[in-house]
């Protein structure tokens, strides 16, 4: 039985905790949060605390707080020589305090509290300084996920950067489209099948094979039409930058 | 029974033809293509020709050829006062020759010959000059699709532009991520659950509600890290442009 203590209860720890509560061979023994938590049904049998000095003995302490607070928080927790991990894509393992053995468990997914997630479909990127700790994290990861990979902090930095492109930046492009259509009273839902097909097409084709459109085929007439349509919007430069980027890929 | 004749046999007409061959109340009576077609099993009972002068009498002629060839081709076909439509998002109805009654049937989806499509999930954007022709196109569209909408050429231009953002530009961002990861020997498949969740999240949240990431929360430390990682790639300017665009959205 792996005893787990959660430190912080943001989106990632919320969903991780929910998954571990239902996992075999894992015992969630405590949840710490700075402020009192809203009542959460899956926590009904689990001790919670808002006081760091009350932390219980556990095998793994999982920090789930904003990136810029991880370093100082990991320094402040009153445990010694335990396995303390964070769950962030953007923070190196070395930002954790050396008071404890250090590790990372990063679920490569976007989370909202209101939307359930299925960890079976989410890759867990694991890192630990000690091989035995990595083994422990693998056992922990395997209890909820199907894909677990050992990823160094350097590799994770590139994965996190790539995730910004396919999640944050892509979502912004969805937003641009929605705004363009709303201004003309056209229903954004009409684009949803295309959005879904674009995301699933790369299961069978690489993105470079799947690339189509006016930029790819150097269709300057259509590009000019689009730039004209964008004249009174904030998106003309964005269109130009992306069109140029696609044209450059052909070289 | 609506008699349909296909003119050109690119990706869109290939899939439309396949769908109409299986549709009730529609008869595909002929397929014209400039060059001889490869044998296609669903055409085995359908007359084909490479000679425009052999065109048969039909109720609807469906042009599926490159955008820049539609105007001159529609002028060249030897029929008069028939309903002639194109299937392009980027071409106005007025580019069709006035020799015939004019219309548009644009399936709002991306097509590859090698990948089957389900028209039930694809919005068909219809336009015709004569109300009776629009009714005919609606009957035709309803024979294969669940979502049919009347869309003017002006509205279609904005939809087509928006489709470039959510399909061509988004796919390019997938490609950027794949390139970044390949250079570091990291498996692009790790990102696929995130890509799919990003695309499906907007079923329940609007893109602006779903927006997260360093640009959104003005996390300059992470943005600096990412720009540093991109220093020896062609993608630094693209990252800056998109980060700035997301930051501007907050204003």
Image (cartoon, coloured by chain):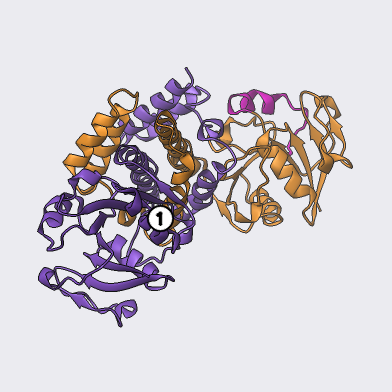
Chain colours: A orange, B purple
The percent position of residue B59, horizontal first and vertical second, equals: 28, 64
The percent position of residue B103, horizontal first and vertical second, equals: 28, 51
User: Residue at (21%, 76%) from the top-left corner?
Assistant: B48
Depth check, front residue: B180 or B56: B56
Going by the image, does B207 lie left or right of B124?
A: right
Secondary structure beneath disc 1? Answer: helix
User: Residue at (11%, 54%) from the top-left corner?
Assistant: B75
Of all residues, the one furthest to the top in this rendering is: B251
Q: Quadrant of residue B7?
A: bottom left
Residue ID for mark 1 = B138
At label 1, counting other C-alpha atoms closer than 10 Å, the crowd grade (few under 14, some 14-19, many 20 or more) is many
The percent position of residue B149, horizontal first and vertical second, equals: 42, 47
Q: Which residues are magenta?
A: A66-85
Depth check, front residue: B224 or B59: B59
Above or below for A44 versus B87: above
Of all residues, the one furthest to the bottom in this rendering is: B45
The percent position of residue B84, horizontal first and vertical second, equals: 23, 57
Q: Quadrant of residue A9?
A: top right
User: Residue at (29%, 41%) from the top-left corner?
Assistant: B153
User: Residue at (32%, 30%) from the top-left corner?
Assistant: A238
Q: Is residue A199 visible?
A: yes
Please give the chain letter of the residue carrying mark 1: B
């Amino acid at each position: 039985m792996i005893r787990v203590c959660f430190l912080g209860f943001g989106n990632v720890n919320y969903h991780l905790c929910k998954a571990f509560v239902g996992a075999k061979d894992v015992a969630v023994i405590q949840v710490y949060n700075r402020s009192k938590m809203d009542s959460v049904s899956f926590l009904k049998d689990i001790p919670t605390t808002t006081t760091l000095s009350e932390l219980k003995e556990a095998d793994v302490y999982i920090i789930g707080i904003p990136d810029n607070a991880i370093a100082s928080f990991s320094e402040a927790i009153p445990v010694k020589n335990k396995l303390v991990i964070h769950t962030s894509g953007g923070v190196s393992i070395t930002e954790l305090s050396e008071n404890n053995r250090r590790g990372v468990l990063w679920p490569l997914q976007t989370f909202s509290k209101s939307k359930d997630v299925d960890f079976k479909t989410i890759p867990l990127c694991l890192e630990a300084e000690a091989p035995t700790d990595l083994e422990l994290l693998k056992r922990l990861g395997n209890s909820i996920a199907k894909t677990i990979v050992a990823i160094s902090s350097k590799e994770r930095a590139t994965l996190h950067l790539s995730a910004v492109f396919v999640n944050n930046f892509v979502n912004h492009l969805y937003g641009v489209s929605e705004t363009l259509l709303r201004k003309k009273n056209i229903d954004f839902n009409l684009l949803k099948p295309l959005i879904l097909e674009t995301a699933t097409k790369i299961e069978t084709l690489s993105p470079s094979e799947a690339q189509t459109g006016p930029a790819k085929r150097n269709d300057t007439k259509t590009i000019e039409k689009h730039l004209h349509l964008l004249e009174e919007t904030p998106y003309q430069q964005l269109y130009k930058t992306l069109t140029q980027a696609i044209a450059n890929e052909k070289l």
